[in-house]
Amino acid sequence: MLSAAVLQVSHLKDLVTLVDPTSRYTFLNFLARTGRLHRFASLHTPLIARREYESYLRWVSDQLDEVQFGCAVEEVTFDGQAFRVESTRGAYAAQHLSIGVGPRPYVPEVATGKLGEDVFHSSDFGYHTDSLAGRDVVVVGGGQSGAEVVDHLLQLSGRDAVGSLTWASRRIGFQPLDESPFTNEWFHPDYVRYFHGLSQSRRSQLLDAQQLASDGISKGLLESIYRRLYHNDFVDSDRIRTTLLPGREVTGLCRGPGGRGWRMSLTHIDTGEIDSVGADIVVLATGYHFPLPEFLHPLGGRIARTTCGLPQLAADYSVSWAGPAGNKMFFLNAGKLSHGIADPNLSLASWRAATVLNTITEIPLYPDLRSSTCSWDVADRPTAHPPVDAGVDLLTESSRQ
């Protein structure tokens, strides 16, 4: 994790606040309990450092005896009555499973089998920051992760500076995150429910159209990069060579002459022209995907899949499977294609957890009040509002007499 990285969501969208703001596990209570609430209030910024949010998560987990770290799940089976979870710390029986292992780094086919010390995913960038000085670096990917890597590289100076920096992306430009109020309505429970009820083809179209609402680059980060590029080109005395290549798709990656470095082939999306760049280091900020966890392979044949091979999720995040209805499996952060762009985002983490709990307990522990500004479905269209004075006896001149 890079030290300058910040969250792209409000601190109110923490583990619990949106469903239980009086919980002791809120981010605000973390600030109060760690003696920093007043100073945080004086920051005048809605952005939280990711390292501070990590500290908040650790603070919560330290209070939960049920949470175990360093405990790897090796296999999950079903014995006819309960799920059997085999782990490195023993076996557990469970009526239900909630699986939130998250996605894995996506590596383009051209880089498959080539990962190592000089070709790696951006999720591993922090392990390689000491080996970049004087090297020619290519960053692939025009989203937030790629931008954070580029911004970090541009901050290096003197003996730590890279030799050159190339930033390539399939996108038509290095575009900002859309954080406007009505766009944020896509990160509302009402919209998630509406999205889930659409056809798969329509959901795919919407995900393409909404890309910048979840995968754009924070405005402040774009401004920082642009400012650093300007200073590099016109102000700094120790310039590095920088090249920005939007609208390019990586179509080849092979060793350079004599087995030294790499040659990357880039195809221009608009013209079809092919170019190549040399690199000592290739950073793949190419996103993530969700494969079925290996520990679920014993149950893999019983889990319903979509045409894309993903678990087929109901609105409450439970998966259809060939087993008793009284034993449910829930998948969190695996339903972008079924639940929309909010699924892998922190924004609705508390609501997703509340949805699962409501299903398991069969009790509306966390009432889900519909409050979106937009009426997404015909059924959501509000009825006429009563007059503001409905139910109130107005004091008129005649009644005063």
Image (cartoon, rainbow, N blue to C red):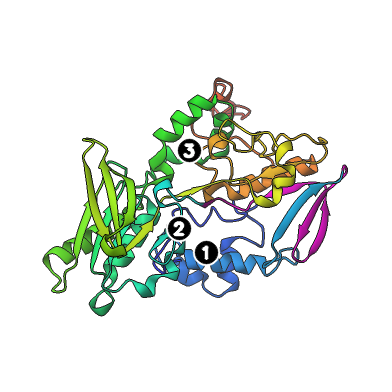
Residue at numbered disc 1: 53
Helix, strand, or loop for circle 2?
Answer: loop
Asked which quadrant contains residue 65, the reply is bottom right
Q: Residues within 10 Å of mark 3 (few under 14, many from 20)?
A: some
Q: Secondary structure at mark 1?
A: helix
Asked if residue 78 is positioned above or below residue 261 in the image, the reply reads: above
Q: Label 3 is placed on what type of residue?
A: Glu
Answer whether labels 3 and 2 touch (C-beta < 8 Å).
no
Q: Nearer the viewer, residue 335 or 257?
A: 257
User: Which residue is drawn at the image coordinates 36% and 53% (left, top)?
Assistant: 218
Is the Cβ of the residue at disc 2 closer than 8 Å to that at disc 1? Answer: yes
Whichever of labels 1 and 3 marks the residue nearer the N terminus, that label is: 1
Extent of the magenta region: 80-104
The nearer-to-camera label among 1 and 3 is 1
Which residue is nearer to you in this view: 138 or 288?
Answer: 138
In the depicted view, which residue is nearer to us: 33 or 222? Answer: 222
Residue located at (74% from left, 37% from top):
302
Q: Which residue is mark 2?
A: 7
Residue at image x 61%, y 30%? 392
* The magenta stretch spans residue 87: yes
In the rendered structure, which amino acid carries the disc numbered 1?
Tyr
Residue at which label 3 appears: 185
